[in-house]
Amino acid sequence: AGGTLQGALQQMAFVSALAGTYVLSGLGTLDQAANGLLAVVISIIASDFFFARFSPAKRYVLCPWIDLLNHHSSQAGSQLAYEYFTDKFAATLDPRSAPLKAG
């Protein structure tokens, strides 16, 4: 399953710290550490962008507001999307429908 930009950045920070420790402690060479770092970068890109788009696996969210927009018949033209880079959901209401009531 795909991740989030924040998760990818945390993984990169962690693997960078590991690679730096690996080289500075004398356990291995810079080339070996760079190979490990490159493997993680390729894995993140493949997981978040390639496999997430072509995989039949689905991700579901339990959120009442999103569920309401998704199933409310008067909001059939509403668009819901997950924004990867901001790690948030975006909802665009149907401009042809009546305004939603407060509450």
Image (cartoon, rainbow, N blue to C red):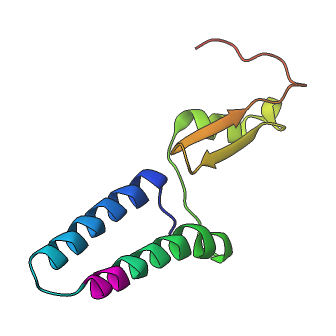
Q: Residue furthest left?
A: 25
> Where does residue 46 sit, x and y in percent of width and height?
55, 76
Question: Measured along the vertical axis of the image, is residue 42 above or below residue 66?
Answer: below
Question: Measured along the vertical axis of the image, is residue 45 above or below residue 70?
Answer: below
Query: On the rendered image, what quadrant is the C terminus found in?
Result: top right
Relative depth, front residue between 50 and 19:
19
Relative depth, front residue between 40 and 61:
40
Occupied quadrant, residue 34? bottom left
Occupied quadrant, residue 101? top right
> Where does residue 15 sit, x and y in percent of width and height?
29, 69
Query: Which region shows up in magenta?
Result: 30-36
Residue 37 vs residue 69: left or right? Answer: left
Residue at position x 63%, y 11% in the image: 102
Q: Residue furthest right?
A: 96
Occupied quadrant, residue 75? top right
Relative depth, front residue between 71 and 90:
90
> Where does residue 85 sit, x and y in percent of width and height?
55, 48
Q: Residue furthest top?
A: 102
Q: State the predominant SS element of the stretch in magenta.
A: helix
